[in-house]
Image (cartoon, grey):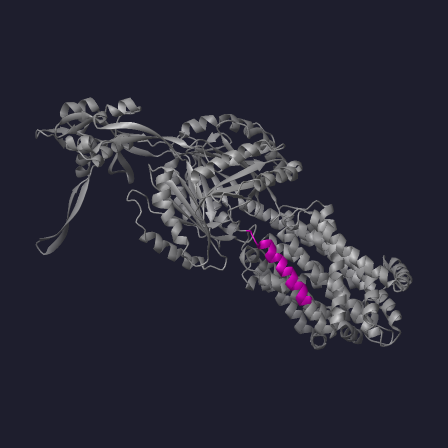
Amino acid sequence: MWLTKIAMTRPVSVMLSVVMMFVFGLSSLTGFRMSYMPSLALPMFIISTVYAGATADVIEDEITEPIADIGKNMSGFLQSITTSEENVSFVRLDFDYSTDMNQCYIDLKAEIDRLDLPADAEEPIILEMSADSPIMEISVRSSTGENEISFVEDILEPKISTVLGVGDVTIFGGTSQYVEILLNEPAMNQYGVSSFMVANAVQNANYTLPLGEIAQGNQSFQVLASSVPTGLYDLMHVPITLPNGSTILLQDIASVSFVPTDAETISRVNGIENIGLSIEATQDANVPHVTGQIQNILNELRIAYPNVQMEVVSNTTDGIYESLQSVGSTLVMGIGMCMFILYMFLGDLKASLIVGSSIPTSLLITIIGMGMSNFDLNLITTGALVISIGLMVDNAIVILESIFKSKTEDKSFYDAAIDGVKVVGGSVVASTITTVVVYVPLTMLSGLSGELFTSLGFTIIFALVASFVVAVTIIPLVYFKLQPIEKNTAPLNKLMNFLEEAYEKIIRKILKRKFLVVLISIASLVGAGYIVSMISIEMMPSVDQGIMDIKVDFRAGTDINFTNQAISDIEQQIANDLRIEDYSITIEGNTVNLTAYIAEGYATTPITEEYDLIFHSVPNMDFSITTRDISGGSSDMPKASISVYGVDYDMVKSEANRLQDAMYKIAGVSKVTSTLKTGGTQAKLDIDPIKAAFYGLQVSDISQIVYSMNNGIDVGTLEVQGKEYDITINYPEGAYDDFNKLLSLAIETPKGKITLGDVATIVFEDTEQSIQRVDGAYNIDLKAFTQEQYLPYVEAEVQKLRDNMPENGIVEVTEQLVKDPLDGEMATIGSAVLTAVFLVFVVMSMQFESIRFAVMVMTSVAFSAIGAFGLLAASGQDLTMVALVGLLMLAGIVVNNGILFVDTANTLKQEMDLEEALVKSGSMRMRPILMTTATTILSMIPLALGIGEGSQMLQGMGIIIIGGLLTSTVLVLLLMPTFYLIISKK
């Protein structure tokens, strides 16, 4: 081979090239972005719109439907999922993965801006969805009782937000201050002053207007008209002109003071009140670099503000480093095992070092390719490096073993190196190309599969190309320089001699039993199919991140202080659990989010299941307890689902309630959740427009009076020592805290003073708490939770409920109405596997110039299936997308053994009888086949055992490869000679 000759004649150039690989490879390694998983940007937008005071029905009609209708006309649109709740609308628009989401955002924003939404509704916010979790959570507390929120809002959050790579910072807990003008109603009645007169006076006293330029001599000055209060004293002395023309001061009818705002959120860590910050990263952020800069900011602020305690509650970087270190140690273990196997087979340390030298060189070349492709260093790409170890030494082993066989007493080491490469060069090229084409479909995947596995495919292709170049250049050159001698005293030499002799005897008998061989092959396929039918299928493997998330929902409208008190017993139970190291809790309105960090040595899933059973029966609380996954998602207890949908909302509700009751009666069901939340009661102020007109008022005038009384009147800001405070006019607390007091509210009219009850009445109405639609159809999702052992029975019973649903054309049921973003991804990977098998077949047909030989070698893929799925089932693992990728890789690995066997048999049959050639071909290639198989299997063992943080993500892949290689190697050596004999007879 010409590459080999160039390398042998130019050793200095080769050596310097290797040095360059080390320099550039290590340089690339330090520049990688690091993360748990590839960033998974989901092709969907969530449009959130706040309309304060509106019911779910009003939200549905005036905001949700108009926004949802926009998506139907957009390119790539798949489905809309809407939720209308009191005060807020959520519209989720899903798009195809091929959609240009940047252009889609521009188009969506333009269409929303054209909508005629209610004037009081806030501007819709468009959020792009991602599967990524917060990269860091920080707790802030003051040791001196100072108000931490000012420090967080004015100093800490702005500094963190300036860090390149920080996407969003959310603050939980704490209360700020505002200036409250508390009205004195008796005094106001005495002077005849209304709240609107007070508001007008304060706004006029806080006034600035540019007046233009005034010339003074030879100079021009900008002139401002300004009246700005600078403190509470100035506010208290704001003048108010009375209807009779006299003037009083604000302090005559109100008190002015700084007061804390009502708590909108509450945050605690391990039971201690704090201010919590949740930090998310941008899509292209280098997470360890970002969190490192945030840590530097915290260290600087700790020195400048010693009274403020800033603690990092969680830091994704810690887990990233642990995961990558774990994979790195797996990589080192794999290399060590490969070296050990080589020594056991060859018995010469020099020979082991020759082959072993191909690993770091090939790795560094691969890393350079990854760096040039801007790949991240994550579990997928580092896992690809682990997988590549066994592949990297395959070519080197075949080349070195051939060189050893070419070396004779009358042949020099130089000639042996050249001849050894020449003998197997064609096989090495063919096997490399065959393996490379297996991974080509991975590089062409789209959608979520593409985001996950494209980098894996390219990484392994880089490794294969690198290993081929190293095998035909560096291996023969190093052999020539070190001049190792094959020793008959190798630890496995006697065993190999025994196996080769036994093999020849066995294979001669097998060649005479063609029918039995075919029968065994068919049985293998049938057995593999049966095993697959028994394996559970899951989209993505669950990886324990050691975090349990508990979400508790109370009835809509529940006061946050009541929620805080009601959750105390549950929080105490978590705090007393020794298996939980730390926990944090945030409360927003009627929703509680509790995150528990599990102590080292405990599995999260059993703890999650235990708490789910404990809390599911707690009254007046809706619990959702999940285990956080390393990929950013979460997993909860096993469940069976029903989606009820239709165009008549009342009928959908009725049917959902009936099915929910039926699901509760199924044995083994621990709880049934429903997206149909309990409806609330709404008090409606029914204002009589005729009576209002009689007193010279309009309905809007009365509504504004009641609104200002209930919510206060914002009248600007007050700047004190560089900080601005909102100014709000309030009535005394409790002045109108029930309906009787409200109806007695005094209102000044042109015809004198009246009460609200003179023109309005209170009407109570039932209202929906939440309305959900999918593509326009009303939808209610029911989930029956159970334990793993009861799941098959529960699923069967739930299926009966679906099957027995009467068809009326108005209400229908299905397992899942909402399309999952992962739907179709298993089919995509399966298609990639079939494409890879076809490409391998094409390449081998072209290599052998024979379709029959290619079909024969492809039987090795069938042989591997029985071991791959058998070991997966025996290990209790599910069949996931990652495991299917392992099957794809297996297709490329196992055919190499078949290619070696067929290539050798084609050469030997020119010199001897066909049956003798088949026997000799198997015995001659047994050693390199066993060596390459053993190195690949041993390099996969740490991965298959799931050793280390996060390695469970790739565990199924390692199991598939090991199981497939074991059975394929044995069956190729034993059965393929017979297949060769069968197809040789035209």
Q: Nearer the viewer, residue 622 or 809?
A: 809
Left or right: where 825 falls relative to 982: left
Say if residue 420 shows up in the picture. yes
Residue 458 visible from this viewpoint: no
Residue 167: in magenta span: no
**Residue at image coords 44%, 31%:** 555
Q: How many marks?
A: 0
Q: Image quadrant of residue 306?
A: top left
Where, quadrant-wise, is the N terminus in this rendering? Answer: bottom right
Q: Position of residue 974 (x, y in %)?
A: 84, 61
For residue 372, what is the image quadrant? Answer: bottom right
* Quadrant assignment, res 670: top right
Please tell me which residue is depicted at 43% across the width and 47% down the height of the picture: 776
Q: Main secondary structure of the magenta part?
A: helix
Tell which of 837 and 393 is nearer to you.
837
Magenta highlight range: 822-840
Q: Nearer the viewer, residue 309 or 784?
A: 784
Q: In the rendering, at what x and y percent does residue 192 appear?
A: 14, 26
Quarter of the rendering occupied by the C terminus:
bottom right
- Tell which of 445 and 404 is nearer to you: 445
Name above or below for residue 653 compared with residue 897: above
Position of residue 569 measured from the top left corner of the image (x, y, whole percent): 51, 25
Position of 876 compared to 38: left or right? Answer: right
Residue 834: say if magenta.
yes
Q: Is residue 642 left or right of residue 875?
A: left
Q: Position of residue 482 (x, y in %)?
A: 77, 68
